[in-house]
Amino acid sequence: MNENDDICGLCGLPGADKIPHPSHWPDERVPDTDLVHADCEVEECARASAMCQGKARDEFLRG
């Protein structure tokens, strides 16, 4: 294991502690590594969820 193995795919900092969830809100940033910090993932998911409103939100939640 090298020092880059635990880099968060959302913030780019070390110490990532989980595998990212497989589904994403429209416009949610998708991690570019195999791990993320749980807090970064929660923050990004909440941001993208708040941005997705109206018809787009309804379509996403039904799909």
Image (spheres, rainbow, N blue to C red):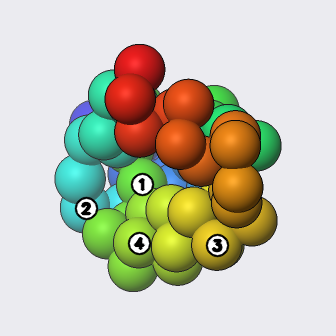
Badge number at residue 9 = none
Q: Secondary structure at mark 1?
A: loop
Q: CA distance from mark 2 to mark 1?
A: 6 Å
Q: Verify CB contact (< 8 Å) between mark 2 and mark 1.
A: yes
Q: Which residue is mark 1?
A: 36
Q: Is residue 42 visible?
A: yes
Q: CA distance from mark 1 to mark 3?
A: 20 Å
Q: Which residue is mark 4?
A: 42
First in sequence, mark 4 or 2: give its number. Answer: 2
* Label 1, residues with CA under 10 Å away: few <14, some 14-19, many ≥20: many
Q: Residue at x 56, y 31 (%)?
A: 59
Q: Is residue 14 above or below residue 43?
A: above
Q: Verify CB contact (< 8 Å) between mark 1 and mark 4.
A: no
First in sequence, mark 3 or 2: give its number. Answer: 2
**Is 4 in front, or is 48?**
48
Tell me residue 33's x, y (percent): 53, 34
Q: Residue at x 53, y 42 (%)?
A: 58
Amino acid at circle 4: Val
Q: Quadrant of the N terminus?
A: top left
First in sequence, mark 4 or 3: give its number. Answer: 4
Tell me residue 62's x, y (percent): 38, 29
First in sequence, mark 1 or 4: give its number. Answer: 1
**Is 5 in front, or is 42?**
42
Q: Which residue is mark 3?
A: 50
Q: Residue at x 52, y 33 (%)?
A: 60
Q: Is residue 33 visible?
A: no
First in sequence, mark 1 or 3: give its number. Answer: 1
Q: Which residue is mark 2?
A: 17
Amino acid at circle 3: Ala
